[in-house]
Image (tube, rainbow, N blue to C red):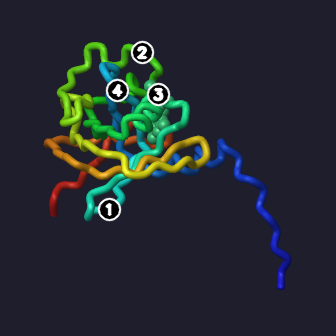
Amino acid sequence: MSASTTPAPLAKDDFRYVIGHFTTGVTVITAIEGEELYGTTASAVTSLSLDPPMLLICMNRQSATGSCVGRVGRFAVNILDERQPDLAYRFASKSPDKFDGVEVTLGCFGEPLLVGALAHLETRVVEQTAAGTHVIFVAEVERAQAGEGTPLAYYRGRFSRLHIEPDA
Ligand SMILES: Cc1cc2nc3c(=O)[nH]c(=O)nc-3n(C[C@H](O)[C@H](O)[C@H](O)COP(=O)(O)O)c2cc1C
């Protein structure tokens, strides 16, 4: 029997480089508390269950939007269209004016929905768990609608477009 060795801990940069090969869509998570609007660009969004319809998001503990979601228990997922990298940059910032000049409609609980996004999902948090630097919010989807378009993608630290094969 060969002796087992414990691997050296994986370096943060090595993990970032490798996991960056997993291509994701790009969303903006939005929430509201009183009159205050919150929004953050997020790629850590996963469909979880169809019945009931559920998804999860992972929010850094430093995220003002994530903290708001923890307090109010509701958020919307805005799936960005490929024409919206500007919104992805804007909502990845810490600017207090992120919503200035951004066209929104209001969801059923007042949360801002970004006009022109490819799809919107309005959710209610049912569970939250701390993990590493992040908080995982598990939520039931109460309303969802999608339009026509092509999603913005994120690959190895860059915004990208999908090449979609025509139907055979
Ligand atoms: C493409 C992309 C994806 C991101 N995904 C996430 C994510 O899934 N979760 C997260 O907490 N932050 C994510 N961020 C970082 C946040 O957008 C960023 O920290 C933002 O400033 C947080 O804003 P807030 O503090 O106002 O919520 C991502 C940034 C980019 C550019």
Give the image location of residue 78, x and y in percent.
28, 37
Please tell me which residue lies in front, 166 or 13.
Answer: 13
Residue 65, relative to residue 97: is it above or below? below
Q: Give the class, few, some or many, for how many residues have Cα within 10 Å of label 2's Cα (few <14, many ≥20).
A: few
Q: Nearer the viewer, mark 4 or mark 3?
A: 4
Please tell me which residue lies in front, 20 or 165.
Answer: 20
State the residue at coordinates (37%, 26%).
38
Please tell me which residue lies in front, 97 or 31.
Answer: 31
Q: Give the Cα separation between the discs numbered 4 and 1.
A: 27 Å
Q: Give the class, few, some or many, for how many residues have Cα within 10 Å of label 3's Cα (few <14, many ≥20).
A: some
Residue 31 lies left or right of residue 130; in this view the side is: left
Q: Which quadrant: the C terminus?
A: bottom left
Residue type (three-letter) at the residue carrying disc 4: Glu
The numbered mark at residue 49 is 1
Nearer-N-terminus badge (2/4): 4
Q: Are marks 4 and 3 in contact (CB under 8 Å)?
A: no
> Disc 4 beta carbon < 8 A from ligand 1?
no
